[in-house]
Image (cartoon, coloured by chain):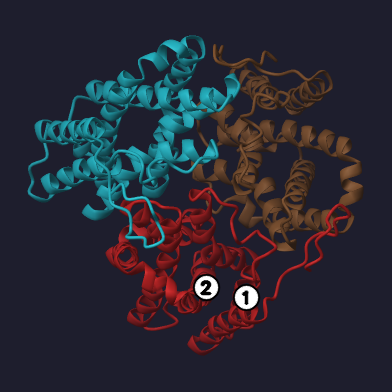
Chain colours: A brown, B red, C cyan
Amino acid sequence: MQLQQLFSPSVQHTLDVIGIFVFAISGALLAVRKNFDIFGIAVLAEVTALGGGLFRDLVIGAVPPAAFTDLGYFVTPLLAALVVFFLHPHVERIQAAVLVFDAAGLGLFCVSGTTKAYSYGLGLTASATLGLATAVGGGVLRDVLANEVPSLLRWDRDLYAVPAIVGATMVVLCVRYDALNPFTSGLAAVTAFVLRLLAMRFHWRAPRAWNRRSTVTEE
Amino acid sequence: MQLQQLFSPSVQHTLDVIGIFVFAISGALLAVRKNFDIFGIAVLAEVTALGGGLFRDLVIGAVPPAAFTDLGYFVTPLLAALVVFFLHPHVERIQAAVLVFDAAGLGLFCVSGTTKAYSYGLGLTASATLGLATAVGGGVLRDVLANEVPSLLRWDRDLYAVPAIVGATMVVLCVRYDALNPFTSGLAAVTAFVLRLLAMRFHWRAPRAWNRRSTVTEE
Amino acid sequence: MQLQQLFSPSVQHTLDVIGIFVFAISGALLAVRKNFDIFGIAVLAEVTALGGGLFRDLVIGAVPPAAFTDLGYFVTPLLAALVVFFLHPHVERIQAAVLVFDAAGLGLFCVSGTTKAYSYGLGLTASATLGLATAVGGGVLRDVLANEVPSLLRWDRDLYAVPAIVGATMVVLCVRYDALNPFTSGLAAVTAFVLRLLAMRFHWRAPRAWNRRSTVTEE
């Protein structure tokens, strides 16, 4: 429990809501691109923003999940959906900014997800895995509902999971060496955030399996 | 608990089984259209009929979910699968009737889902959301398994979520003002049912985001 | 509880890990075929190997699920992903062997899934259903994430669910007649295994619904 209060509750809540908002924007934008109606936009915003945390809470037995007990968590994606609905040509124009915010959400969620899982008694590896799942799960659900191959899994996308894995690993190492505090947590989140920005800037990609039938060699 | 017994248990159970049956028919028909075999038909019937309630029960912590404790809930979709397997040209011919039954299922499930969630201690907004999820979740899972864009999210389908949202909202308003009883519950279910029928009759659709690249203007 | 210890714990654990490994190989191979990067390969290996058991554990309320409490369960799919990453042309060449191992995993998981569900207090039908879900659930999640129609549902694949249904049914019949022991459990697993091998050898398929518009007649 103590672990969950790394930051003052209001600071933590504000960080969570920011992460939820930016993830919801990415879900709503995909919904617009897929030509969904306003309800489809709202659903995809909710799922993208809350799906990862929902999965984590079901796995650790934290029911009902935070997504259903905190009204702010539920309303935020609806606001994001409205913003996109009315302003999406502008939101698309600032796509680069959206990606920066999404990277911030990735950093925040991998840290808070890992911390929450550990505070529910899971082991270090399992906590880091759930931190990763919290950070990337919503995006995977978003892509599945939009009937697309999850961009998490595609080789032609800049590294997304690795920054979250690094952030989650830093958290569990801090736990292991009794050094988890607001500063080290913040450092883990910032590290994941910066790594993701660098991955986008320099188009870092992960290798694919060596494939003799492939004529493409973009590793 | 008291809330769950709006109707006598046997009446409630009968209503549930009817809703399960009609949703299962819609899943089985999609399976036939996708050229699945008899087991695929049975799986899609089960998932469509029970998926929404299963999700609700996992979220509210009602485990094992009703889908796995009530044999009638489990067997009903299998019967629907058999009906479709042997009679599907006839079932397709009465597609209009199937849609009417599906609308009835939508009305029944949004009310019973909302009520059950509230009886497990969730807030009003969360209860209504889970009522909606109970009503539409099975159909979303059906479409995901069939590798199609969920018809819930598509702009070119008549309103489906809105009637369920209205029904679920009526239930939580009744709870809020202490007016939930078999009559008001039934009214909420009938309202959702009739709204869905009207949406189909008059092809009510929800707006999409204004899209300057789109040449289509069917809003 | 007693039921879970049909075999000595170490034997049971070894059987589980073998099943997890072979399922993970099938997930990793599909990831390679879909051109995913190394992280996509690892994710699909994990989901394929652990998804069915994860679903079962959420349904029966066994949280946190075994997938997150047993480090061996988590690491095994990563090893499978590495094997495929470096050796996949060789693994593909021995595709027939992989299918045999996958059949073994199917037999093991339908038995252990049914047994675990029953030991958590579910009824016989529900236990058998969860045994089936344990055995085939990972493969369904694998195909959904890879954006393909689940091969479980396709008519043009050799019988996959039926052997698992037979194995799970044998287990619940043994429970019903108080005859569940390591020998009968093993017999159920071997029966499912052999049935699956025969289905592959002789291309047994399940019938589709009679379809007057279809010109194909491969039932």
Check disc 1: other Cα within 10 Å, few if <14, some if 14-19, many if 20+: many
Of the image marks 1 and 2, the number of the one nearer the N terminus = 2
Q: Quadrant of residue A55?
A: top right
Check disc 2: other Cα within 10 Å, few if <14, some if 14-19, many if 20+: many
Q: Is residue C123 visible?
A: no
- Marks 1 and 2, how far apart in space? 8 Å
x then y, percent, for residue C57: 39, 42
Q: Which residue is mark 2?
A: B106
Which chain contains the residue that carries disc 2? Answer: B
Q: Which amino acid, by three-letter code, is at mark 1?
A: Pro
Q: Which amino acid, by three-letter code, is at mark 2?
A: Leu
Q: Secondary structure at mark 2?
A: helix
Q: Is residue C104 left or right of residue C151?
A: left
Q: Residue at x 88, y 47 (%)?
A: A91
Towards the viewer: B66 or B161? B161
Asked if the residues shown at circle 1 and circle 2 are in contact, with their CB atoms under 8 angstroms apart, the answer is: yes
Q: Is residue A87 left or right of residue B195?
A: right
Q: Residue at x 81, y 20 (%)?
A: A198
x then y, percent, for residue C116: 28, 41
Q: Which residue is mark 1?
A: B163
